Image: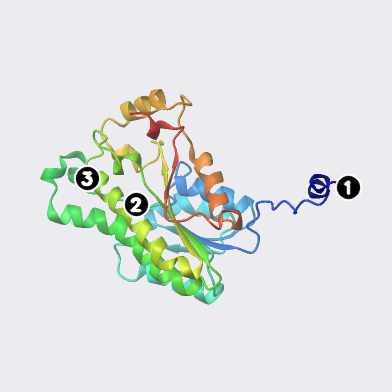
Amino acid sequence: MTEAAAVVASPEPVQTLSLAGKKGLIIGIANRQSIAYGVARHVRAYGAELAITYLNEKSDQYVRPLAEEVEASIYLPCDVREEGQLEAVFAAITEKWGKLDFVIHSIAFANRDDLHGRVVDCSRDGFALAMDVSCFSFIRCAKLAEPLMTDGGCLVTLSYYGGRKVVDHYNVMGPVKAALESTTKYLAHELGAQGIRVLTLSPGPLRTRAASGIAHFDELLDAAAAKAPTQQLADIDDVGSFAAYLVSDLAKSVTGTTLFIDGGAHIVG
């Protein structure tokens, strides 16, 4: 038997995507159109056990049926602006599971006036609020998750192309998302030795409740679809399936970067 034949005859086993035994926290589901819900569906389909949060009593009626659908083991309120709520979520995870394998951070917020106005006109308090909810809360998640990820893990957040290039009407969220993407790199550097990976996903524009607050959003959707080499936009299932791969052991060498899920729109000027 030749050397080449021997290699073909005894290949290494092909590893398949499985999240069985993994525990994950998903923050940011608001309704069925949420990116976080798309991720929850896919990671659950691959076997992950989930903790799901909802923003407040008003959102509970929309999120609870979705949490039940993915058989969430933990379901708690989490408004990162409210003192102690994020910490309470991690305390419940510690008590029930004693470990955590991945976190999906899919929250962002800016006051309407700041979002619809020029960056130069943004208020100090408005800028601080947008940074706190959209960026610093990811750092808080990393700090709280670190002691639970003793066997390594993956932290994933969500950005948008407006953090890289100027996008009309994205306004104050552009600098905020740029900060979030930079934060990803620094967290990846600091936590990598512990086997904790940190990633940003950057879908193109999707019809979510959060996106509806952006002025002229329909025009943004049309422009993005026309610009993309694939001539179509991604959807929450595209994001969900990719996220499932990234939090799995198949992606154990992927960290510290922003990954685009936008039909290639980001490569076109």
State how many labels appear: 3
Q: Please, is residue 134 above or below residue 211 in the view?
A: below
Secondary structure found at label 2: helix
Query: How far across and down, in percent of the image, does residue 260 sit?
Result: 44, 41
Secondary structure found at label 1: loop
Quarter assignment of residue 101: bottom right
Q: Visible in this render: residue 79?
A: no
Tell me how far mark 2 sits from mark 3, CA to CA. Answer: 15 Å
Residue carrying label 3: 172
Secondary structure found at label 3: loop
User: 264 and 118: which one is in front?
Assistant: 264
Q: Residue furthest front?
A: 2
Q: Nearer the viewer, mark 2 or mark 1?
A: 1
Q: Nearer the viewer, mark 2 or mark 3?
A: 2
Query: How far across and down, in percent of the image, does residue 266 sit?
Result: 38, 34
Q: Residues within 10 Å of mark 2 (few under 14, many from 20)?
A: many
Residue carrying label 1: 1
Amino acid under disc 1: Met
Dot 2 or dot 1, earlier in sequence = 1
Amino acid under disc 2: Glu
User: 184 and 133: which one is in front?
Assistant: 184
The label shown at residue 13 is none
Residue carrying label 2: 181
Tell me how far mark 2 sits from mark 1, CA to CA. Answer: 52 Å
Q: Is residue 226 left or right of residue 44?
A: left
Tell me how far mark 1 sits from mark 3, CA to CA. Answer: 65 Å
Amino acid under disc 3: Val
User: 205 and 4: which one is in front?
Assistant: 4
